[in-house]
Image: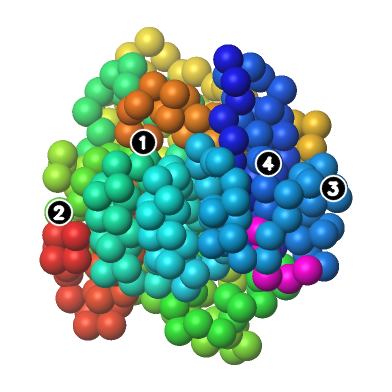
Amino acid sequence: MALLRGGLIGCGFFASNHLNAWRELARHPDGAEIVALCDRDPARLAAAAAEFGVARRYADAQAMLAAEKLDFVDIVTTAPAHRALVELAARHGVAVICQKPMAPDIADGRAMVEACERAGVAMMVHENFRWQAPLLAVRAVLDSGVIGRPFWGRVSFRSGYDVIAGQPYLAEGKRFIIEDLGVHVLDTARFLFGEVARLTASTTTVNPAIAGEDVATMLLVHRDGVTAVVDCSYSSRRARELFPEVLVDIEGSDGSLQLDAGYALTVRSPAGIEQRDVSPTLLPWAQVPWHGVQESVLNIQRHFIDCLRAGTAPATAGSDNLKTFALVEAAYGSAATGETVDPARFA
């Protein structure tokens, strides 16, 4: 079976994780390889090409798509560039992976999804948090039914990690943590508890050097009856730095589960109390503490390739991610007005 051929656009901060995962997938006969790279920064392009052994290099995405025969393109640029690149790929009939957030606003996101649907090409948003091994373990417990019907939950990401150091542009936008990180945590809540009927949000800016919010707390009422607290912070000075762990607490009609610090999963059910270590795999190219996120990159990219080969929609297809994007918009709307918001207004 021939490897699928991909091009990657954007060789910046997070691209090395994508490229490492693609290199690993290229070792499998039903996998994929990156055959071309594109970046407007010559030095960054040359460095990535040399590190990952990619000979075909382009400064312009149009030139790359015109010259190369590609099965997919992996877009790892910042959000303002996403719509033009996704629509370009769609015009060339090439499937798309697009980094999150999918666009600067939901109108652009809808246009991107529509362009891919018209062209008949797959579009997946690289919403990788739900592909982290500990969160997959939590989902498996819910699917097993051992804690009964969930009625309350919390999904939490609290850290003092200096994310601005690696991505200084994040300090400049009027939207920060909900758009950049909260989108992951909100998508995790959707993954675990289903769609949201009502959302209330409050935000705070603690760091005086940034323009946007760095703390957000959201109350979600899900359609299936779960009430969930979703909170995220980049200004938490804790005794133990948890970056980039996601903590989860769920109560059900027959029991409960807790995903605690150190990837410790505790499940209480009628059968008793079970404790498990659900630590992510430390891949050869990964580094602690990023390894959980890095493993999820491999997991989601493998999922995308499997879906392309099977002709099925990815779990985080563009159309699905619009529902997460609607939660982001609802959170900002609620924080601005103090009102409870129906996310359907933005979908």
On the image, numbered disc 4 is attached to which residue?
35
Q: Nearer the viewer, mark 3 or mark 2?
A: 3
Say if mark 3 contacts mark 1, CB within 8 Å. no
N-terminal of the pair, mark 4 or mark 2, is 4
Relative to 210, does residue 287 appear above or below in the rendering?
A: above
Is residue 262 in view from this perspective? Answer: no
On the image, numbered disc 1 is attached to which residue?
315
User: Which residue lies at the image location 26% right of the left edge and 69% below the top edge?
Assistant: 107
Distance from disc 3 to disc 1, alpha carbons, whole Å, reads: 31 Å
N-terminal of the pair, mark 4 or mark 3, is 4
Circle 1 — which element?
loop
**Segment colored magenta:** 38-42
User: Which residue lies at the image location 65% right of the left edge and 34% below the top edge?
Assistant: 33
The answer to whether residue 239 is left or right of residue 86 is right
Q: Nearer the viewer, mark 1 or mark 4?
A: 4
Task: Indicate the amino acid at tag 1.
Answer: Ala
Circle 2 — which element?
strand
N-terminal of the pair, mark 1 or mark 2, is 2
Q: Which mark is residue 51?
A: 3
